[in-house]
Amino acid sequence: MSRILAVVAYGILALTMLGRPAQAQQPQEQPAKPPPFATTKVEGTDNVYVFRYGNSQAMFVVTSAGVIATDPIGYGRPQAVTTYIDEIKKVTNQPIRYVIYSHHHFDHIAGGKPFKDAGATFIAHKRAKERLEQIKDPHTVIPDETVDNNRTITLGGTTLELIYLGLNHSDSTLLMLLPKEKIIFTVDWLPVGTLPGRGMIDFYPLEAEDSFKKVLAMDWERLIPGHPGRDGRLGTKKDVQDQLTFLQDASEAVKVAAREGKCWDAVEKEMKLPKYADWPNYDAAMPFVLRRYCGLWGRGT
Ligand SMILES: [Zn+2]
């Protein structure tokens, strides 16, 4: 009934507009594209910020004795790094004392030279340094200092713990914990409300489960991911648990298929996990996830 009324109403509207196209025929407005970068103070803190550039982000912490920055996120876009430094300067005059790498992948850590020129000390897990020294990427600063299992940085009254949980995404991931603020920053292995995509290329499925269990047992409330979470939100322990459940479901399904000889092609092309079909990047991400688990259960890798 209301639909018929609407059609009649639009008909009258079209007539009264004397040839101008009726509004109903206009293409629907697209949702506004987010600005190219943004700096956001984490709610409820005095000094913890998220710098997002494009689809990557990093945490920085401002203290009375200097700034602790993380990942430069400048792969193929040096302007991201200079923008990052300009954004820090907008909120503080303090010098940038540290840059801490989340892990060794270039999409997160390339481009750090302007931070180096500003006098920052670069810290990473020891395997990140070993790897970077082998590859010698011209755009990636080699860390000055390394962490083996744990290190605590105390600066201007802020404590930041750098924690190595073992193999998960890459062999060099540091989880960064602000114990007072109960915030963690860790990259690529704990997506918030989305599926892991290309990150699965360098992922240790069996060992990573340990890391998930360890992070669930730690004392924190909010997770800053290395790529914006679903709707731009921060993560919670529920997101970590959901991600673990997703990986376990994918793993179990592929294991059965692999033992029937269906890896790689049949699994990659045909397998679906409908429970997760409404996660934002389901179609793009699933082939990466299925390929990784075919590697495990169909080949032993
Ligand atoms: Zn990565």
Image: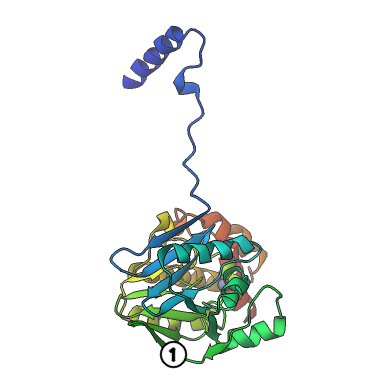
Residue at the farthest front position: 93
Whether residue 207 is situated above or below residue 253 in the rendered picture:
below
Q: Residue at x 50, y 84 (%)?
A: 207
What residue would you read off at disc 1? 151
* Rendering coords of residue 65 (x, y %): 39, 80
Q: Is residue 233 left or right of residue 201?
A: left
Tell me if 134 is positioned left or right of 69 in this view. right
The front one of 295 and 45 is: 45
292 and 203: which one is in front?
203
* Percent position of residue 214, x then y: 39, 83
Q: Nearer the viewer, residue 299 or 97?
A: 97
- Figure quarter occupied by ligand 1: bottom right
For residue 295, which quarter of the picture?
A: bottom right
In the rendered image, the quadrant that contains the N terminus is top left
Q: Nearer the viewer, residue 213 or 134?
A: 134
Name which residue type carries label 1: Arg
The answer, for residue 294, to whether it is visible in the render is no
- Quadrant hosting residue 260: bottom right
239 in relation to 232, above or below:
below
Quadrant in the rendering for residue 300: bottom right
